Image (tube, rainbow, N blue to C red):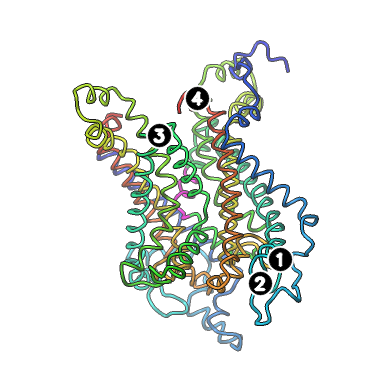
Amino acid sequence: MANSTSIDPIVTARKEPGILVQIARRKLALFGLFLVLLTVFAAVFAPWLTSFEPNEQMFDGLSIHGAPMPPGGAFLLGTDLLGRDLLTRILYGARTSLIIGVAANGLALLIGTIVGVTAGYFRGWIGSVLMRLTDLMMAFPALLLAICLAAIFQPSLWIVALVIAIVYWVQTARVLYAETASLAEREFIAAERTLGASHIRILVKHILPHLVPTIIVWGTLGISTTVLLEATLSFLGVGVQPPTPSWGNIIFENQTYFQAAPWLVFFPGLAIVTLALAFNLVGDALREILDPTQRGRD
Amino acid sequence: MIGFFLRRVIQSLLILLGVSLITFVLLYWLPADPVRQIAGRSATAQTVENIRQQLGLDQPLWVQYWRYLTGLVQGDLGRSYLQKTEVSTLIASRLPASLLLMAGAIFAELLIGLSMGVIAALRRGTATDQSLMIVSFIGVSAPQFVVGLLLLYVFAVQLGWFPIGGYGTFAHLVLPSMTLGILGSGWYSRMMRSSMIEVLRQDYVRTARAKGLTRLRVIFRHALPNAILPIIAMIGIDIGIFMGGIVVVESVFGWPGIGQLAWQAIQRVDIPIIMGVTLVSAAAIVIGNLLADLISLLVDPRIRTR
């Protein structure tokens, strides 16, 4: 569509260096991006990075007393209680975390966007009902709700993703509601409406493009939150079920033994913190880059 | 102002009503049958049916919900399926431990978070500022069970400074409070930093300096009290995160609070307890938000005129 007559400010926005260039200029964000790529690499190439199978119980994986092997030697990060190679399980566990980060967070973002934009644009009774629903969701202790839901359904990877999305969409919805509501009052939207543009056209062509920065920022930060939620649910035993490796359930399976074999908690824990930190660093930089109200501040 | 407050109270009660309905419906659809659990594997079909009738689980959903709601108004949260005790009694006996943990956690997160934020703001742009902000990022990226288990390993198992778990003395309180506090301090330090930077930029701070007051006096008497205002309201909102966190932290440290009660009930499908704890948590969250609003209203006259 020709947009030359539009007074929508996004069309006339000044050109700035690409997002990647701006991230590259920030040391911390670049470090975060590096960690993200490292995790993706580990997840994709897991079979080539290790010579063991994730569920393979090695004959020499336990000491003669039946204890797990400490880090070093043939098993770089040691073995777990069942004599499986810990590094291998952590590498494959990256797949679980990334699938959750993408699927659960993506679904939460989708629900949040639909609810927030609908409520903010149409307001009236639809808006009221939807926003009261988010008030309700905010009053639930999110983690407790997720634990209940995960315990009700028989947890599998996809059920866990669904549960996380159900408790996590609310924040996105509220932020996008506020932004959409203020956008809907701007002159260029009123002008489009006067020109006879349909609701769908206004929403897709003029509202959504303005929300993209917010959606990107919340989408990135949300990966962090959803990865942490999955790890916590799996740690409690109501998340991703063994033998499928997940960083949370590796700790769950081995925690009874952690005083004698702390590496079984330390390394998967380090992996969780690293991935969550990586997305937090990138997300925070994106917020500074994309949010005009943040510009010019520290 | 009183009108505004009343409206918020009514709104909060409606929210709690909604929470009770949703939780009730969710738990009613629970595929795992509590009656089988109570009766045991060897129970006959007749016994199972008797128990079902006894508990009123054979009634339609709305009848059950109405019965629950009328009880709730009188402070009755029902009876535990397995422990044969009033849920309100169970929660009341567990609540003090959780409140103590909450107080400890809030103290820890404010102590760590606010001091980090203030130092970062005063040293803005320096290496100190940057490293403090990296630490706060790590704090918000670390799941509570990992922090908890690591603290346990280092300070209880290796150094032996604190007990490995349990409840009773001040020493028992330190590690669980720190676990919850480290996560929270990450948020508080970042908020405190930007709030402090904002305040230091204000004219009255410059005036105070120009009057000849010392730097320390300006920071502690003029800047800090104003910078803390937006943070106080955060504590109310924080309760929601806290209510989820105690399930994990209490299970890691064997802390006998309502989080542990809920977790045990979830594993045994003891629905009345799960309902009760969810409602109490929701009430805590709603009250926290209400207090946050009220405090902002009282301390910031600009909001009152709106």
Q: Residues within 10 Å of mark 1 (few under 14, many from 20)?
A: some
The CA span between labels 1 and 4 is 48 Å
In the image, what residue type sits under mark 3?
A: Ser
Image x and y of residue A208, in percent: 62, 29
In the image, what residue type sits under mark 2?
A: Met
* Residue drawn at the location 43% of the way across and 58% of the way down: B179
The CA span between labels 3 and 4 is 14 Å
Q: Earlier in the sequence, mark 1 or mark 4?
A: 1
User: Element at badge 2?
Assistant: loop
Give the magenta-colored segment's residue range: A132-141
Relative vertical location of residue A146 with respect to residue A118 in this rendering, above or below: below
**Chain bearing mark 1:** A
Name the residue tied to disc 2: A69
Tag 3 near tag 2, CB within 8 Å: no
Name the residue tied to disc 3: B194
Relative vertical location of residue B66 with respect to residue B133 in this rendering, above or below: below
Name the residue tied to disc 1: A75
A201 or B286: which is nearer to us? B286
**Chain bearing mark 3:** B
Name the residue tied to disc 4: A295
The answer as to whether the residues below labels 3 and 1 share one chain is no
Q: Earlier in the sequence, mark 4 or mark 2?
A: 2
* Quarter occupied by the C terminus of chain B: top left
The quarter of the picture where residue A94 lies is bottom right
